Image: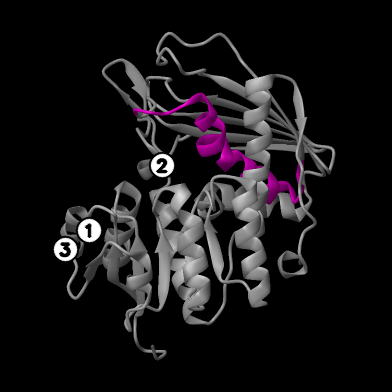
């Protein structure tokens, strides 16, 4: 690839997220094109590849990465497949955007981290897309000015209209609260040291085997307290909101009041129905930032350390959910590669 050539990307996983990224790269992102797609479902891979000129379909990620026109990899396969794909990319020194979770557990995330550290440079950006949302970016910038003083608390609400089939009580933590885990660490610059998961009255709208909602409390090494209301069967739509309480003021994002209508004796607006609506711009901005950095020979954004830390916090949260009580987070020492 020369400076003028588009970045050739292999997209691993062509389910809902992967197919949406293929569309995004081809239609919205500049400086890149999809040259290969990979899925264990060969028919699905061929169907997605057929929508892109010059795109090859594969069932083996290693074969796709070996192609001459692949310069970078976007991993959007299920979490358990991430470790093998990341290690294969490392062997070929390919830059990667890996959707969250980095891996499903802290042990495998630590193995990925060790492998990247052995390369001596970052290769991976983890897909915590809220860092690229306009409202969250504005909140982060405000906190960095110091105008509000030190952050004391963070209140989060994370609601889905309905949980998908097969969604488990553990997944409320590992797949959903994982976002608030990263948001907390990023906004405050703190590590999360302990997690407590409380079980409110279970909603009648939740499947019989699902503990929904859940109320999660984080403690941080900076002394802040963070709470997360996680409710995946609220019934009315998709909401993500956050309010920071600081020494000299507060700031809130996610109210969704971009437009309020008054008509026929009623006032109101609309509520997004899923994450692809609420965070569409964030995904666009995230992928473009990754492509731009990769073309410059850089890796920016959330790191493997961020993915590992989120996995460790979520493990502590799942343990608290199952066993009850406060669970401390066990983190490895942060490698020098991820400092500063």
**Residue 34 locus on image (x, y percent):** 29, 70
Q: Which residue is mark 1?
A: 45
Q: Is residue 150 visible?
A: yes
Pick whichever of labels 2 and 3 is earlier in the sequence.
3
Tell me the colour scheme of the image. one colour
- Give the structural element (helix, strand or loop) at label 3: loop
Q: Which mark is residue 278?
A: 2
- Give the structural element (helix, strand or loop) at label 2: helix
**Residue 88 locus on image (x, y percent):** 47, 69
Pick whichever of labels 1 and 2 is earlier in the sequence.
1
Q: Which mark is residue 322?
A: none
2 or 3: mark nearer the eye: 3
Which one is nearer the viewer's eye here, 340 or 115?
Answer: 115
Q: Quadrant of residue 229?
A: top right
**Residue 261 locus on image (x, y percent):** 34, 29
Q: Is 266 on the left or on the right of 115, as rendered?
A: left
Position of the N terminus, as image quadrant, is bottom left
Instruction: Reply yes or no: does residue 147 show up in magenta.
Output: no
Q: Is residue 303 visible?
A: no
Which one is nearer the viewer's eye here, 2 or 107?
Answer: 107
Q: Is 156 on the left or on the right of 62, as rendered?
A: right
Tell me the residue at 62%/30% (across/down): 318
């Amino acid at each position: 690839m020369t400076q003028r050539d588009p970045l050739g990307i292999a997209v691993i996983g062509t389910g809902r997220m992967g197919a949406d990224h293929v569309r995004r790269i081809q239609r919205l992102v500049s400086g890149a094109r999809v040259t290969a797609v990979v899925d264990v479902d060969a028919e699905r891979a061929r169907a997605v590849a057929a929508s892109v000129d010059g795109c090859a379909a594969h069932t083996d990620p290693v074969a796709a990465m070996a192609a001459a026109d692949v310069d970078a990899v976007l991993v959007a396969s299920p979490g358990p497949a991430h470790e093998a794909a990341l290690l294969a990319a490392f062997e070929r020194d390919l830059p990667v955007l890996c959707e969250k979770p980095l891996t499903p557990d802290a042990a495998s995330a630590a193995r990925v981290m060790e492998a990247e550290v052995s390369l001596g440079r970052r290769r991976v950006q983890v897909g915590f897309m809220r860092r690229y949302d306009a409202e969250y970016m504005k909140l982060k910038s405000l906190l960095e000015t110091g105008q509000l003083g030190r952050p004391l608390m963070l209140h989060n609400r994370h609601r889905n209209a309905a949980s998908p089939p097969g969604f488990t009580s553990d997944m409320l933590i590992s797949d959903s609260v994982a976002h608030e885990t990263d948001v907390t660490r990023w906004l405050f610059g703190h590590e999360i040291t302990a997690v407590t998961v409380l079980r409110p009255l279970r909603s009648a709208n939740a499947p019989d085997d699902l503990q929904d909602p859940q109320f999660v409390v984080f403690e941080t090494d900076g002394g802040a307290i963070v709470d997360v209301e996680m409710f995946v069967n609220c019934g009315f739509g998709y909401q993500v909101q956050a309010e920071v309480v600081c020494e000299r003021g507060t700031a809130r994002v996610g109210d969704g009041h971009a437009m309020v209508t008054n008509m026929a004796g009623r006032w109101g607006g609309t509520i997004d129905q899923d994450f692809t609506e609420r965070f569409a711009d964030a995904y666009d901005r995230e992928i473009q930032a990754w492509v731009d950095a990769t073309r410059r020979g850089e890796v920016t954004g959330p790191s493997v350390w961020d993915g590992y830390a989120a996995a460790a916090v979520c493990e502590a949260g799942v343990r608290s959910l199952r066993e009850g009580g406060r669970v401390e987070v066990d983190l490895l020492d942060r490698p020098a590669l991820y400092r500063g």
